[in-house]
Image (cartoon, rainbow, N blue to C red):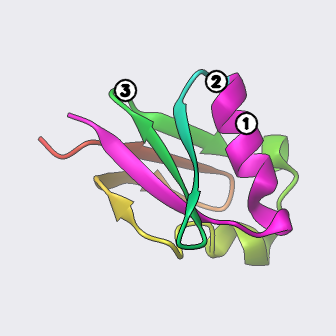
């Protein structure tokens, strides 16, 4: 199943968008102030690789997700489509 993450279109969150593009995920232009990142596979993000501090990391999903949070700790998050 597909997982979709809505990332705020703010400069502070652009590392998430760019890392998603590099990883080959489907990244759509922002609509309504949010980037839409989609994948048929798990989406895995690593805080230190993105250069996000704890406050931004903890608010990275503020736009919402269509899927499930498999893991979300201080260093890594893994998101998966609903089964």
Q: What stretch is highlighted in magenta?
A: 1-22
Does residue 29 appear in this view?
yes
User: Residue 19 got which mark?
Assistant: 1
Residue 77 % position (x, y): 54, 50
- Residue positioned 67% across, 30% down in the render: 21
Q: Are marks 1 and 2 in contact (CB under 8 Å)?
A: yes
Q: Which element type, helix, strand or loop, lies under badge 2?
A: loop
Residue 61 belongs to magenta span: no
Mark pair 2, 3: CA separation: 11 Å
Q: In which quarter of the image is residue 45?
A: top right
Crowding at dot 1, Cα within 10 Å, few <14 / some 14-19 / many 20+, comes out as some
Mark pair 1, 2: CA separation: 6 Å
Q: Do the residues labelled 2 and 3 touch (CB within 8 Å)?
A: no
* Residue topped by disc 2: 23
The quadrant of the image that shows the C terminus is top left
Outermost residue toward the left?
Answer: 83
Give the number of callouts: 3
Residue 68 % position (x, y): 29, 54
* Residue topped by disc 3: 41
Q: Report the side of 53 relative to 34 (left or right).
A: right
């Amino acid at each position: 199943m597909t997982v979709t993450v809505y990332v705020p279109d703010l400069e502070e969150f652009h590392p998430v968008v760019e890392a998603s593009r590099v990883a080959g995920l489907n990244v759509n232009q922002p609509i309504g102030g949010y980037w839409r990142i989609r994948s048929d596979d798990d989406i895995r993000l690593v805080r230190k690789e993105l250069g996000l501090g704890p406050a931004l990391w903890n608010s990275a999903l503020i736009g919402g997700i269509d899927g499930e949070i498999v893991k979300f700790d201080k260093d890594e998050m893994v998101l998966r489509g609903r089964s």
